[in-house]
Image (spheres, grey):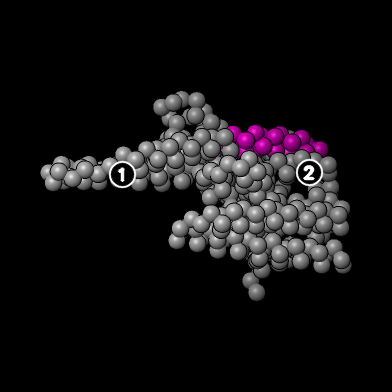
Amino acid sequence: MIFFTLEHILTHISLSIVSIILTIYLINLLVHEIVGLYDSSEKGMVAAFLCITGLLVIRWIYSEHLPLSDLYESLMFLSWSLSIIHMLPFFRKHKNNLSAITAPSAIFTQGFATSGLLTEMHQSTILIPALQSQWLMMHVSMMVLSYASLLCGSLLSVALLVITFRKKKNTFLFGEIQYVNEISHVNNYFFPFRNYHRHQLIQQLDCWSSRVISLGFLFLTIGILSGAVWANEAWGSYWNWDPKETWAFITWTIFAIYLHTRTNENFQGSNSAIVASIGFFIIWICYFGVNLLGIGLHSYGSFALTFN
């Protein structure tokens, strides 16, 4: 009973913290970035990470298995993984654009996990026989870590595409403005300066996206291989082509194509970002959408949304 109470308290504390952090991010986005508020939000993310860590540890202790047996637990672990990715630049005392992706992702993931939609999964249950294996920790943790990394990298690619599109649009408008200014003999010096910083931002997004996706692809490969070994032990076959396995293979293929395009300089930048953006939707189908079907060998991961 005490473990359940502690878990309940940590859940509400972490959710309260991330709600405040989301408010701070909206203030910085809509008004103006305030250094004090930004530092507070970063410290808040650390506090939320510690709460989620405590929650997962407590759930692990009283359930006597790694808390990755259902959607609620995997979403909390996904939020925990996103928080780790978010804090890496913070502890290096280096501010970059990765935090603008990871923080909201972690906030919304935890918000959905702790909402009333998944109430039935909040109570830990005994593992079904198929999950009572040492491969649970290896396979599921690698898959969730890969989802977190690939989602962050894909969102960075989406941001790159948005900025690139706006850059091309502004370049066209700048040509008209420049023509008018030449007639009126008005000199504008801020356009080249702004375009230079926009180019730098695009390069940073491209670099970070490539790094994070490469890490996620490694996790995904390990997760699929360990899952194949586990499947052979549990079901007598390394691969069965059920919906979860099929979409995992599609996800792996999409990001393999992305990494292949990165080897050609002509396809780097916006071209490879398009592939990663497609991968963003594929990940959600693999991780979340397939569970809605409730069919196949992974049907134990299915769920029904509960509306109060």
Q: Magenta part of the protein: which range?
A: 213-233
Q: Is residue 187 above or below residue 304?
A: above
Circle 2 residues within 10 Å: few <14, some 14–19, many ≥20: some
Location of residue 230 (image quadrant): top right
Residue 190 has which mark? 1
User: What whole-number distance in Å separates the C-alpha atoms at marks 2 and 1?
Assistant: 54 Å
The spot of residue 88 in percent (x, y) is 64, 42
Do residues under tags 2 and 1 come within 8 Å of each other at their CB atoms? no
Q: Is residue 132 above or below residue 252?
A: below
Give the position of the N terminus as an image quadrant: bottom right
**182 left or right, relative to 97:** left
- Nearer to us of marks 2 and 1 is 1
Q: Residue at x 65, y 57 (%)?
A: 44
The spot of residue 59 in percent (x, y) is 81, 57
Q: Is residue 214 above or below residue 44?
A: above
Looking at the rendered structure, the secondary structure element under dot 2 is helix
Q: Residue at x 52, y 45 (%)?
A: 97
Whether 175 is among the magenta residues is: no
The secondary structure making up most of the magenta span is helix
Circle 1 residues within 10 Å: few <14, some 14–19, many ≥20: few
The spot of residue 167 in percent (x, y) is 34, 43
The spot of residue 120 in percent (x, y) is 73, 66
Q: Residue at x 61, y 57 (%)?
A: 40
**223 left or right, relative to 96:** right
Q: Amino acid under label 2?
A: Met
Mark yes or no: residue 28 visible.
yes
88 or 249, which lies in front?
A: 88
Which residue position is annotated with label 2? 137
Residue 114 has which mark? none
Q: Residue at x 80, y 60 (%)?
A: 124
Q: Is residue 43 above or below residue 247?
A: below
